Image (cartoon, grey):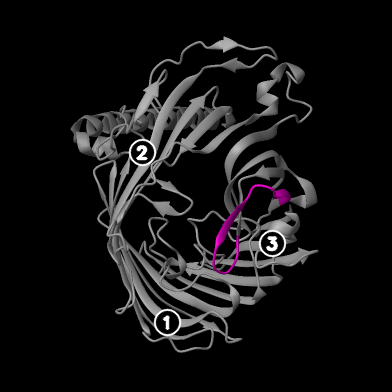
Amino acid sequence: METIISNIVCRFRAIKAVLVVLLIAQSAGMAQENKWNLSDEALRRSRLSNEVIPLQLDGVPGRNGPFIEIGENFLGSGNLQGGFTIPGGAVWQPYFIVFGNLRSGLQTFGTSKRPVQEWANRLDLFGNLYLTFTERIIVGIRPLDKKGIFTGYTFRPGTQQGINVKDELNAEITTLFFEGDFGELFPDLDPFDKHGLDFGLSVGRQPVSFQEGVLINDNIDAAGITRINMKWFGAINFRWSLMYGWNKINRRSATINLEDNKAQLVGLFTELDNRASTIAIDAIYVDAKDSTGDGIYGGISNVSRIGSMNATIRIVGSYPIGKETDFNRPGALLMAQLGWTPVSTHNFLYLNLFAGFDKYRSAARDPAVGGPLAPSAGVLFSGAGLGRFGSPLSNIADDVTGGVLGYQIFFASNRQQLVFELGGRYGYKDTGQSAAAFGMRYQVALGQRFLVQIDGAGGYVFLVNNVKPADQTLYGARFEIAVSL
């Protein structure tokens, strides 16, 4: 009896196995049939499709090469040249490019009783000799402007001689420096990259900007060394830079810029990235003796997110040592910036607030960049960097409080943008300017090399150094075309 039952069970299992195999085969056949019945579009959208889809380049512009390129094509495609090996083991593959930016603007500004109308031009031209992707030599000139004076034509007011043409043509080198990585220059010293010799090096006439240009913003003759990717203090990344500057140091007072070629400076700059924020702590000592005065300058900033908002807190200070001049006055500047993207938009809404205590001075400032509030306080506090068109609101930070509320709109596939700002400043010790203003900026990209910018601003000046000015209305309007070379 048991044998009969056992045979029946075995036969039942065999029949069940055959049925399962038949069902799987039928399902596979139906899937194959359905596959060939699907449209090409349906197959392309399937996650399981093995169709090869080529690189989608629709709407992607072609390579916009620099003005001049010798050797490799900058951001081009194809095989790289072999290069040659220098002592120390580095392989150099030199190529040279020339690039720059040409700006030309028609602008009017001032008050109704004292307007200024001018045409100004600026050319920033650079030559970049790449030795490798980390080592390069850069030379730059600004042949149309010098010491804050720009080549162009002044329509109003005219000169007493009736000559309104400004010719500032020159061949002065404004930028000339080498930068590279010690470990890449001498790879034979550490062939297995065990000893951490990756120090960044730079030497020559170079742009220097820290604390968003509030602490220092100038082109100076300097040498620097940098180390990044360190894990100190539990950081994701810690960076430090040590710099020494010996020439072309521009000192700024409340009214003028002075190039002090006798001044020297030493700076230590640090930045720490953790999971919640980026913290920067910087310090500079300027040795200028009796010409513009010695001083210590420092800054601390924290950049973080509060929910969906970006928040920046920054405080910078200056303290004279020895003889005090108008270029090394004591003071501090506190700045707070908050920005966020409104829901369902790609636009940007921001609020910038500041308070200046006593008479803060930057360690060094280029004549074309304005005072300490430019450009980080907002468009209303930023000059054009072209001609005499200054900021609608004064960017000097002496005993002042104020801020701006701005909204930046992007449209036309991000090729156009429009910025609106409402801002003001109040000199709470009866010094400087107390005023309010409204401004706008429209930018549109034309092709791959042209940019058109239109600026406009209007405002009302309440007091200047506790005195009501004769003309309290202020305005500014400008039209600029910029060409990328």
The residue to which callout 3 is attached is: 299
Disc 1 from disc 3: Cα separation: 28 Å
The residue to which callout 1 is attached is: 436
Q: Is residue 456 among what the camera can see?
A: no
SS label for mark 3: strand
Q: Earlier in the sequence, mark 1 or mark 3?
A: 3
Q: Residues within 10 Å of mark 3 (few under 14, many from 20)?
A: many
Taking the spot 66% from the left edge, 58% from the top edge, the residue there is: 363
Q: Is residue 267 magenta?
A: yes
Taking the spot 76% from the left edge, 31% from the top edge, the residue there is: 196
Front label number (2 vs 3): 3
Q: Please indicate whether residue 456 sits to the left or right of residue 145 in the image.
A: left
SS label for mark 1: strand
Asked if marks 2 and 3 touch (Cβ < 8 Å), the reply is no
**Image spot of residue 348 (x, y percent):** 41, 65
The residue to which callout 2 is attached is: 47
Asked if marks 1 and 3 touch (Cβ < 8 Å), the reply is no
Q: Earlier in the sequence, mark 2 or mark 3?
A: 2
Q: Earlier in the sequence, mark 2 or mark 1?
A: 2
Q: Nearer the viewer, residue 190 or 476?
A: 476
**Image spot of residue 36 (x, y percent):** 21, 29
Quadrant in the picture for the N terminus: top right
**Image spot of residue 421 (x, y percent):** 39, 73
Classify residue 471 by image quadrant. Answer: bottom left
Disc 2 from disc 1: Cα separation: 58 Å
Front label number (1 vs 3): 1
Q: Nearer the viewer, residue 374 or 176?
A: 176
Relative height, residue 360 to residue 248 (above, below) = below
Give the residues in magenta. 252-269
Instruction: Tell me the amino acid under the disc marked 1.
Output: Ala
Q: Please indicate whether residue 479 sits to the left or right of residue 374 in the image.
A: left
Q: Residues within 10 Å of mark 1 (few under 14, many from 20)?
A: many
